[in-house]
Image (tube, rainbow, N blue to C red):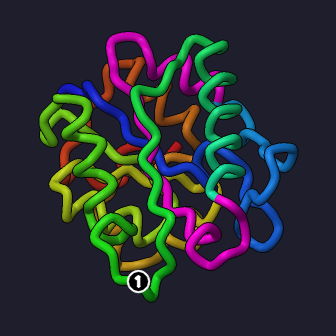
Amino acid sequence: MTVQHVILDRDGVLNVEATGGWVLRVQDWRWQEAALEALAILSPGRTLSVATNQSCIGRGLVDAAVIEAVHTRMCAEAAAGGAPFAGVHCCAHSPEEGCRCRKPEPGLLLQAVGASGIPPEHTVFVGDSEGDLQAARRAEVTPVLVRTGKGRDTESSSAATGVAVFDDLLSFAHFLRRGGTLSPSAGRVGTQ
């Protein structure tokens, strides 16, 4: 498979998860180590998108404008590093609302695929949770697991069976740059 579109989960993949699980202030945003370097490696010749559950909005913990400001900062810093995002797809619903966009449902990923114009068979979704892997499969894109965030715990779950696993986003980026290929049945090809 030729990877033309990389969809990325946010919390635990791009940024360090905040205490309590949510980044509720712009100043609390912190990139995962080497995530910006990884994005700069992934970007040339590929479309990059973000798909993130932000139920902190639906739970009333933060105003949507604050999360938009966090995403504005994230996008500006990524673009300054040579890796612009084509889109940030965000589900603001609480789990109780039962929406189709909240991962593990496929809605966010289907939005990202549709907006990119790149078919699912050339798209991967990099996540750190069981819900991320389930959403990828439901959207018929190739799931990739990183061990940052919740990834180490997720790796031992049944959801991770047959999924390529990488230490972090940078090791995945290097794998692709070296010409590594992925398929839905690739297994743990990236255990580096």
Q: Which residue is mark 1?
A: 97
* Residue 4 counted in the magenta span: no
Can residue 77 be spotted in the picture? Answer: yes
Q: Is residue 101 above or below residue 1?
A: below
Q: Name which residue lies at 40% across and 71% down.
A: 131
Q: Name which residue lies at 15% across and 54% down.
A: 140
Depth order, front residue of 18/62 = 62
| The residue positioned farthest toward the bottom in the image shown | 96
Q: Quadrant of the N terminus?
A: top left
Residue 77: horizontal and vertical position, in percent?
A: 69, 23
Query: Helix, strand, or loop for circle 1?
Result: helix
Q: Which stretch appears magenta? A: 36-63
| The residue positioned farthest toward the right in the image shown | 27
Q: Name which residue lies at 33% across and 20% down.
A: 46
Q: Is residue 140 above or below residue 169?
A: below
Q: Name which residue lies at 73% across and 39% down.
A: 31
Category of crowding for the residue at label 1, using alpha-carbon neighbours closer than 10 angstroms: few (below 14), some (14–19), many (at least 20): few
Can residue 155 be spotted in the picture? Answer: no
Depth order, front residue of 2/24 = 24
Residue 139: horizontal and vertical position, in percent?
A: 19, 57
Q: Could you tell whether 35 is left or right of 183 in the image?
A: right
Residue type pointed to by label 1: Glu
The number of numbered badges drawn on the structure is: 1
